[in-house]
């Protein structure tokens, strides 16, 4: 599809969208040496093997093998078509694509495209009605009474659906949308064979956006006696509430900045916190936290602060969410609220500063929360319950990696229940041994991935094969080396794929391109070859390499070619000797073949 958009436009889009910045919006990256590492978004893993190189503008996962440039990444992560990936990146960098001659292909069905468009129109309509019309006054008044200001109303594009049966239907049908499609999308409700009505009439509207900022559904909040109090769009190809998080599109950049995310249960909590200056905030969509949501958060951030209601139900929901997030690799903090408080009501009562300082910044560790949470199940005045409680806490402490953290809570238990720290430590270490947990000095840092990658890549290749890969890795970064190889070897590589890659590289430089691995990958049509180029490009190489070293690689490769010819000739002679009933000569030739093969494996 790339030939429909001028090459220079594609190149400009690639160069104005740094791969580290783009991937950093989807994966929490940490710099190690010259590259960045994170958890692969394409397969489940706990030890990061996903590498991004800013210098070469490519990514590669040493675990699942996926790799490419910024365009490849967007196509993989979003299931975008080529055009959608280009358009998305062009919009981010303010580049206008030419209109003519481009097939605007889409990765979603025509029906879903229409529904997406209808949601876009409705977002604008509902918002306009709330802000600027008589019909929206009661909705606007409700939001003001809830402490939501105009800036937040604009930021979240809050709106109001008038309590008029066919207002929305007439508006969208005039825009060209089919009535039955709008019913299927849950925008309209079917009353009878001929009549429809707005699903959300009489409600304050909360557009629900996907992670790239497109409205895919709505949440409606009744402001009178309507039931249910909250009403969401039905699930569809575009909207799966167990996979989305409210406000994730706006929160992403703030999450990256502070490397923490605050998790709420509702829209109003998010909007109040955002308005209060805490902007790294998201919420589930009316359901308990799900596995896909937990995995999504873990990909972006290390620490999740759970800020649910302070009542008994909120406490139970916090525990369940914490366990799910921990299972998926997140560090947990818990914001503590009084039993009669939720985040929104706390902000309204005590203000922004108090919320940030006394709730968010004062969040307790998971272990402190767990000790508090578990107490509700025991009568600690009873000796048996007290012992059971302590044993449960020790089992949980045994799972903590940090020896400092373990000792801190052991001392808390020791002081609170007047038990020697030695006795508590002894019991806890028994639990650690039963779980097969390694000693403290064997614990591995989350981002220590070099050994893992080395093990995955530990394959034994013959010397000529390694020489060809090394040589290509230098050719990808230096046109002078490529010219030298072309003059001295031409396409004289022994591995067919290496011959093809080298031939493409010769053509790439002859067209006047400077070394640019990301652009070179785009010009290859074979996905298998692309992956090989990415793997080779990710190999560690010297900043400067001498002609002597390059000559050594060339010599090893050419020797293999010559030896291969010699082996073929010797095998024919051996066969002839056997046919002539000359076993001695056949054995001598066999020894020559063995010697050459030994030389191929170890040419030095």
Image (tube, rainbow, N blue to C red):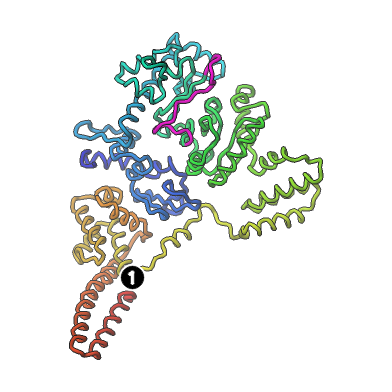
Instruction: Mark yes or no: residue 51 visible.
Output: yes
Across and down, in percent, residue 437 comes to 62, 58
Please identify the quadrant where the C terminus is shown.
bottom left
Q: Is label 1 in a helix, a strand or a loop?
A: loop
Residue 21 position (above or below residue 109): below
As drawn, is 284 to the left or to the right of 97? right
Q: Does the segment drawn in magenta span residue 510?
A: no
Across and down, in percent, residue 55 comes to 36, 50
Please identify the quadrant where the N terminus is shown.
top left
Q: Residue at x 28, y 37 (%)?
A: 83
Which residue occupies the foreground of this view, 536 or 552?
536
Which residue occupies the foreground of this view, 589 or 255?
589
Which residue occupies the foreground of this view, 13 or 4?
4
Across and down, in percent, residue 14 comes to 31, 42
Residue 594 position (above or below residue 181): below
Q: Residue at x 56, y 42 (%)?
A: 324
Number of disc labels: 1
Residue of label 1: 462
As drawn, is 432 to the left or to the right of 578? right
Q: Residue at x 77, y 44 (%)?
A: 385
Badge 1 local density, few (<14 within 10 Å), some, or many (20+)?
Answer: few
Q: Residue furthest top?
A: 134
As drawn, is 76 to the left or to the right of 319? left
Which residue occupies the foreground of this view, 366 or 353?
366
Q: Which residues are magenta?
A: 222-242
Displayed quadrant of residue 367: top right
- Please tell me whether the stretch drawn in magenta is mainly helix, strand or loop: loop
Q: Residue at x 63, y 60 (%)?
A: 439
Instruction: Mark yes or no: residue 143 visible.
Output: no
Across and down, in percent, residue 306 comes to 59, 36
């Amino acid at each position: 599809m790339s030939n429909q958009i001028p090459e220079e436009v594609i190149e400009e889009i690639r160069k104005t969208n740094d791969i580290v910045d783009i991937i950093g919006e989807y994966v929490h990256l940490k710099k190690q040496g010259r590259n960045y590492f994170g958890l692969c978004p394409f397969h489940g893993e706990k030890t990061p093997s996903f590498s991004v190189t800013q210098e070469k503008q490519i990514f590669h996962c040493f675990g699942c093998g996926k790799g490419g440039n910024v365009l490849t990444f967007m196509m993989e992560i979003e299931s975008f078509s080529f055009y959608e990936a280009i358009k998305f990146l062009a919009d981010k960098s303010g580049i206008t694509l030419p209109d003519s001659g481009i097939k605007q292909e889409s990765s979603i069905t025509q029906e879903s495209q229409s529904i997406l468009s209808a949601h876009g129109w409705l977002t604008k309509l509902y918002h306009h009605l709330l802000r600027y019309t008589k019909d929206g006054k009661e909705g606007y008044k409700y939001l003001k009474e809830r402490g939501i200001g105009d800036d937040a109303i604009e930021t979240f594009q809050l709106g109001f659906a008038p309590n008029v049966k066919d207002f929305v239907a007439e508006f969208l049908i005039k825009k060209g949308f089919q009535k039955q499609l709008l019913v299927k999308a849950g925008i309209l409700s079917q009353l009878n064979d001929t009549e429809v009505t707005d699903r959300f009439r009489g409600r304050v509207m909360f557009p629900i956006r996907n992670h790239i900022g497109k409205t895919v559904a709505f949440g409606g909040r009744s402001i009178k006696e309507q039931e249910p109090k909250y009403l969401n769009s039905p699930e569809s190809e575009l909207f799966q509430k167990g996979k989305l998080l409210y406000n994730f599109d706006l929160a992403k950049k703030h999450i990256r900045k502070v490397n923490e995310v605050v998790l709420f249960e509702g829209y109003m909590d998010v909007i109040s916190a955002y308005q209060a200056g805490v902007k790294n905030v998201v919420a589930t969509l009316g359901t308990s936290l799900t596995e896909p949501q937990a995995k999504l958060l873990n990909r972006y951030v290390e620490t999740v602060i759970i800020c649910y209601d302070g009542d008994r139900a909120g406490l139970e929901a916090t525990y369940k969410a914490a366990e799910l997030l921990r299972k998926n690799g997140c560090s947990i903090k818990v914001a503590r609220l009084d039993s009669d408080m939720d985040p929104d009501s706390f902000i309204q009562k005590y203000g922004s500063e108090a919320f940030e300082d006394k709730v968010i910044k004062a969040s307790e560790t998971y272990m402190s929360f767990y000790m508090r949470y578990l107490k509700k199940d025991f009568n600690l005045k009873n000796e048996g319950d007290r012992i059971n409680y302590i044993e449960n806490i020790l089992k949980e402490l045994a799972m903590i990696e940090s020896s400092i953290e373990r000792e801190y809570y052991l001392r808390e238990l020791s002081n609170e229940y007047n038990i020697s720290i030695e006795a508590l430590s002894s019991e806890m270490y028994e639990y650690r041994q039963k779980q097969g947990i390694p000693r403290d000095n064997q614990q591995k840092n989350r981002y220590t991935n070099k050994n893992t990658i080395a093990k995955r890549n530990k394959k034994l290749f013959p010397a000529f094969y390694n020489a060809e890969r090394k040589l290509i890795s230098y050719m990808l970064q230096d046109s002078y080396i490529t010219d030298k190889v072309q003059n001295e070897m031409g396409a004289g590589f022994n591995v067919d794929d290496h011959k093809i890659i080298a031939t493409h590289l010769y053509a790439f430089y002859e067209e006047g391109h400077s070394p640019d691995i990301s652009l070179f990958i785009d010009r290859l049509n074979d996905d298998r070859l692309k992956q090989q180029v990415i793997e080779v490009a990710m190999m560690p190489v010297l900043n400067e390499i001498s002609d002597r070293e390059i000559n050594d690689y060339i010599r090893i490769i050419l020797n293999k070619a010559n030896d291969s010819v010699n082996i073929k000739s010797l095998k024919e002679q051996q066969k002839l000797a056997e046919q002539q009933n000359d076993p001695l000569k056949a054995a001598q030739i066999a020894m020559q073949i063995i010697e050459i093969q030994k030389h191929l494996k170890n040419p030095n």
